Image: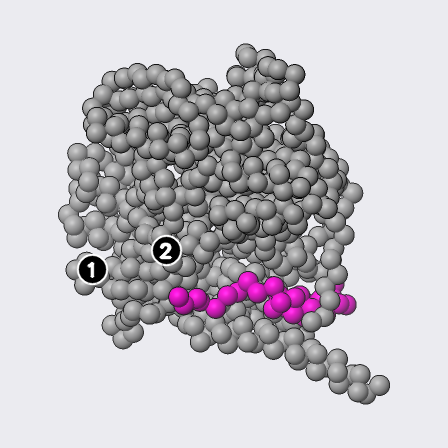
Amino acid sequence: MNQFPDFRDPRAARIVLSRIAELATGQPHRKFMEICGGHTHSIYRHGLEELLPQNVELVHGPGCPVCVIPMGRIDDAIYIASQPNVVFCCFGDMLRVPGGKLNLLEARARGADIRVVYSPMDVLTIAEREPERDIVFLAVGFETTTPSTAVTVLEARRRKLSNYFVMSNHIRIVPAIKAILDSKDLDLDGFIGPGHVGTVLGNHPYEFVASEYGKPLVTAGFEPLDILESVMRLLAQKAVGRCEVENQYTRAVRDAGNPVAIGVIDKVFTVRPHFEWRGLGSIEHSALMFRDDFAEFDAELRYSVPGIQIADPKSCQCGEVLRGAIRPWECKVFGTACTPETPIGTCMVSSEGACAAYYNYGRFNKSPRIPVTAV
Amino acid sequence: MCVGIPAMIISINNDKAFSAIVDVEGVRREANIALLADPADPVREGDWVLLHVGFAMSKLDEAEARSTLEFIRALGSVYDEEVEALRVQD
Amino acid sequence: MGHDAAGRERLHARIEKWRRRPMRLHDEVITTAHGAGGKASQALLNSVVFPAFEMTGAAMDGAVLQVTPKHDLVMTTDSFVVTPRKFPGGSIARLAVNGTVNDLAVMGAIPRWLSVAFVLEEGLPISEFRDTVAEIALAATEARVGIVTGDTKVVGRGAADGLYVTTTGIGVRQHGIKLGPSEVQPDDVVLVSGNIGDHGIAVIQARGELDLVSDVSSDCAALHTLVGDLLVSGANVRWMRDPTRGGVASSMNELAMDAELGVRLREENLPVSRTVHGVCELLGLDPLYVANEGKLLAVVSPETADKALTSLKDHELGRNSSIIGVITSENPGIVVLETLFGGTRVVDMLVGDPLPRIC
């Protein structure tokens, strides 16, 4: 059986780590932000951070679409899920995100018909099998996932489904990156760029990071070798004072992205004037809603959600973690009042949240760093 | 950001629009290939694609993958050659 | 790494202190997380069950009842509620026998007698009940246990997912056998008897909700002969467990907490079949947390580790056995995994249901 080339080869990793060590020697302390939650997860899962030189620090950014959902939106979701005759479908990650009082898992325990799906298309199958119920899908994600929702909506129209609705929480990566760059309390040297969003948008939308803000960005894949090679490339740029947007994930990301995917997003969705992000406040043009032409699928119109904004608990510092201003362990409630089983904020719930990743994978007294020997 | 993994197209479903069966390490699942519906470069059996929430997002270029890996591995030998060259100089 | 190392150490100490507090129950209603075998399950037991019965965690695995100067009876009970009731490689019937047989075996007891209690849902076809009972009888014969008593109840339509089974098992072991977390010492070796994650993946697939097709089969099996061979092999066995829901990770975490020692696993030595690995990648699951129903975890002394491995591999159920880690005095209470790259990460106890990670 064919195997796609493996990007987890430990020997190759040691080679890249040697180069990283070389390049980092003599450089000042470098802070690179990896924007995607998927990168955060991969870094911690494979224990990559401790293999980097002391002066190379990885900062975790807000690219975890589950993490940035404010509590009020969860309450809206629970409101919809609790309406009579509703079957509420979502991805698994969403079940334990805290709302004002409950999360979706608890709402299910109290009688709401909430079901986990793997793919947005699975929701159509449910809608067809249960025509007497109203099926609502909680759509979450950056531009990687938005095209899938859009295709599903188009398919629902083609199949003439009248019992299928979507609550859109789709968000856009570029405004998030801008918000980080505009943030005063950060001092980043470069970015490990979103790889899977890149398969949709291509590399060009990130150009402004280098051209307007003077920071290099390397669009990276998610395997350990991808991440390590990207760190190496960032250090190489810094070493000679270059500032460019590079593509490390060439096997999946083309410069022009995926025009079909971009087209289908644009056909179904339009940009909301502003949208509340957990911890980052309101960001303009950062999220998507249905175009008028597709209003019949909009769950928020059908169900008149309360739409109440709930302030994060006072002790919650998710916002600072999402912006990279503090590290997870610097949050006052990290590991004590806020743990994966008693999360105060979403950074601790989502498996890609920086806090969950650190708590689940990184948190313990490590033995002295294993010296990286040249291969 | 989101889980995306390499999957190989095993068969294209002629009866259902934009549907294919993909294989991930011996596991098979239906995948939607609407996002790869480029008439100039259609998806074929044997192609590798990036699979995310049941959708094929992008074709994975196997040759490009190999070339990335070779590049990385070659870094090691370049390094060794440099070290060797330094040693010879001594 | 290494920024404010002293501050981080203080934080780790604070977290560990917090972690050792009895897990608190915050919920007002039962959720599926309480059945997953991880932290929520523990919280429920610690808060509600143990205090009422004056029990400790050890008693939930099995009770040791001394009856004669030379022999103890070991007693254990388990309920089986799996859906679907039949899946590749197994069924609720076979689980009902093997699950309880295994719980007795890992306590060093020879399984002898089972009771079987059924809760049947109105509308269940009698032919299915007949087949289930026949399968139980067959599994019992194969495991050399006698089904000696039982009960049957019927509940209204919609109340029991078809059929629930509870089996209580009694086994016999010599008095004075030393097995348990208190026997485990630093440098002891951890072994597993074969591929992990098969059962959980087989069930997920059989449920059909995630639309996967693969050849994964449950590893449902009775382990008492595998255990028996190990115990007479000359290996110095300190502790055994059959990792079920919550996977190898949960069992290792329980051991680490109970023994107040650390566990250090090596990723490259974890036996995982290619297809299980594929499904886990697809769904964002970690095989360490996926249920098994026919695997043995054993901790043995370092000098006898090779003997133990040979003994397991000689048995047909242990062909893929592997040494997967060691017990350490560092990081007591924590399970650590050495990744393929030489990095390390914590393998924490499961929080709720292993939700397929998607996004």
Q: Is residue A262 magenta?
A: no
Relative to A283, is A27 above or below? below
Residue type, mark 2 in image? Val
Is the residue marked by circle 2 packed among few (<14), some (14-19), or many (20+) residues within 10 Å? many
Q: Which mark is residue A347?
A: none
**Element carrying mark 2:** strand
Pointers 2 and 1 in contact (C-beta within 8 Å):
no
Identify the chain of the residue marked 1, using the numbered disc in the image: B
Q: Label 2: which residue?
A: B27
Q: Residues under labels 2 and 1: Cα distance? A: 22 Å
Which of disc 1 and disc 2 is earlier in sequence?
A: 1
Residue type, mark 1 in image? Ala
Residue C24 x, y percent position in the rendering: 57, 23
Residue C353 found in image quarter: top left
Residue A84 x, y percent position in the rendering: 25, 27
Q: Is residue A2 magenta?
A: yes
Q: Name the outermost residue toward the right.
A: B90
Q: Label 1: which residue?
A: B17
Question: Between residues A314 and C148, which one lies in front from this camera angle?
Answer: C148
Indicate the quadrant containing the C terminus of chain B: top left, top right, bottom left or bottom right.
bottom right
Relative to A186, is C120 above or below? above
Of labels 2 and 1, the one closer to you: 2
Residue C257 x, y percent position in the rendering: 65, 32
Q: Locate residue C249 relative to residue A329 in the image: left or right.
A: left
The residue under the point 53% across, 65% down is A7
The residue under the point 59% across, 46% down is C311
Magenta part of the chain: A1-29
Scheme of image coloration: one colour
Q: Locate residue A277 relative to residue B76 in the image: left or right.
A: left
The residue under the point 25% across, 18% down is C156
